[in-house]
């Protein structure tokens, strides 16, 4: 599957209507790029696989999304993969970045951050197959330690 990146710079005047326009443009671009490569139950498995390999994704990068006065749309966009209740195409992937100095909540102490990371890492056990739970338990501290190290900048 081919990938294409599109960047949308968010700023103080960027509202829901602007993101809606951008999404509509990307949906149209996908229709043109993929040339109607939708799956069809009457097609053979090979034909559908061929369509899948020819299809493309658009990665939508939202920069400084937290500067928008209409930030409520962001939750729906990221968490529900929809906008105004309408599901987005599965080929549109969204990634976003904050403008970090807009909101200052302070920061955790090193110990608090390490404990938080350890607990979040332990939480992943529930997502793993039972066959590897013991292996995960043996390595969870090492994994958390490496994550902590990656946050030390």
Image (spheres, rainbow, N blue to C red):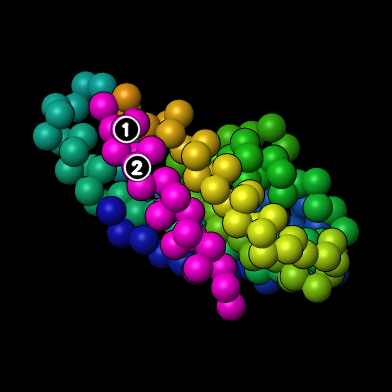
Q: Residue furthest top?
A: 42
| Circle 1/circle 2 CB separation < 8 Å | yes
How far across and down, in percent of the image, does residue 84 sit?
72, 37
Q: Magenta stretch containing residue 128, yes or no?
A: no
Query: What whole-number distance in Å separates the C-alpha atoms at marks 1 and 2?
Result: 6 Å
Query: Residue at the spot x=47%, y=59% of the render?
Result: 145
8 left or right, relative to 73: left
Query: Residue at the spot x=53%, y=62% of the render?
Result: 148
SS at badge 1: helix
Q: Nearer the viewer, residue 89 or 101?
A: 101
Residue 138: mark: 2
Q: Nearer the viewer, residue 65 or 113?
A: 113
SS at badge 2: helix
Q: Magenta stretch containing residue 152, yes or no?
A: yes
Q: Quadrant of residue 12?
A: bottom right
- Packing grade of label 2 (10 A; few <14, some 14-19, many >=20) is few
Q: Quadrant of residue 108?
A: bottom right
Circle count: 2
127 left or right, relative to 148: left
- Packing grade of label 1 (10 A; few <14, some 14-19, many >=20) is few
* Residue picked out by circle 1: 134
How far across and down, in percent of the image, does residue 133 sit?
34, 31
How far across and down, in percent of the image, does residue 66 sit?
78, 61
Whether residue 89 is visible, yes or no, is no
Look at the image and tell me in which quarter the C terminus lies. bottom right
Magenta region = 131-153
Whether residue 114 is visible, yes or no, is yes
Compared to 123, does 105 lie above or below? below
């Amino acid at each position: 599957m081919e990938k294409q990146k599109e960047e949308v710079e968010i700023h103080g005047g960027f509202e829901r209507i602007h993101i809606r326009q951008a999404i509509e443009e990307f949906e149209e671009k996908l229709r043109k790029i993929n040339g109607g490569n939708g799956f069809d139950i009457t097609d053979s498995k090979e034909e559908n696989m061929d369509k899948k390999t020819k299809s493309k994704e658009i990665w939508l990068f939202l920069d400084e999304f937290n500067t928008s006065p209409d930030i409520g749309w962001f939750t729906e966009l990221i968490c529900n993969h929809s906008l105004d209740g309408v599901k987005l195409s599965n080929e549109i992937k969204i990634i976003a970045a904050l403008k970090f100095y807009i909101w200052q909540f302070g920061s955790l102490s090193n110990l608090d951050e390490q404990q938080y990371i350890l607990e979040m890492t332990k939480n992943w056990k529930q997502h793993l197959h039972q066959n590897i739970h013991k292996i995960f338990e043996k390595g969870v501290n090492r994994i958390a330690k490496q994550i902590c190290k990656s946050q030390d900048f």
